[in-house]
Image: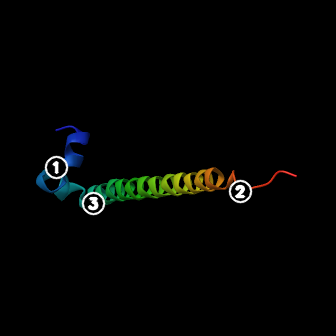
Amino acid sequence: MNRIAKLFTFPFWKEDREKNKKGSIVLYLTIQSIAIVLFLYSYIGIITLWCFHLSYASLWYFAETTKDKIEVI
């Protein structure tokens, strides 16, 4: 089995787990933590973009609703 295939079948290969138990667990947890961090960053990015969109939309709405009420001197 190659190394990449082993990462996705972590609990199921026996010979490598017995030889290098700590290294394979650390590698698995590292990949899992990287995936969790990327997942959280994607949600933070989506929320940030949504906040920018809402602020821009509210500024546009304010400008459109008040443009007839503002007197130019």
Residue matched to label 3: 25
Q: Distance between the residues labelled 3 and 2?
A: 66 Å
Give the number of the mark in front: 3 or 2.
Answer: 2
Could you say which is closer to the camera, residue 11 or residue 35?
35
Disc 1 marks which residue? Answer: 9
Between 30 and 18, which is closer to the camera in this rendering? 30
Q: Which colour scheme is used?
A: rainbow
- In the displayed structure, does residue 55 sit left or right of residue 29? right
Q: Which kind of residue does numbered mark 1 sit on?
A: Thr
Query: Residue, x 18% and y 56% (percent of image)?
Result: 17
Residue type highlighted by circle 3 = Ile
Ranked by sequence position, the earlier of labels 3 and 2 is 3
Q: Which of marks 1 and 3 is nearer the N terminus?
A: 1
Q: Mark 2 points at which residue?
A: 69
Residue mark closest to the camera, 1 vs 2: 2
Secondary structure of the residue carrying numbered label 3:
helix
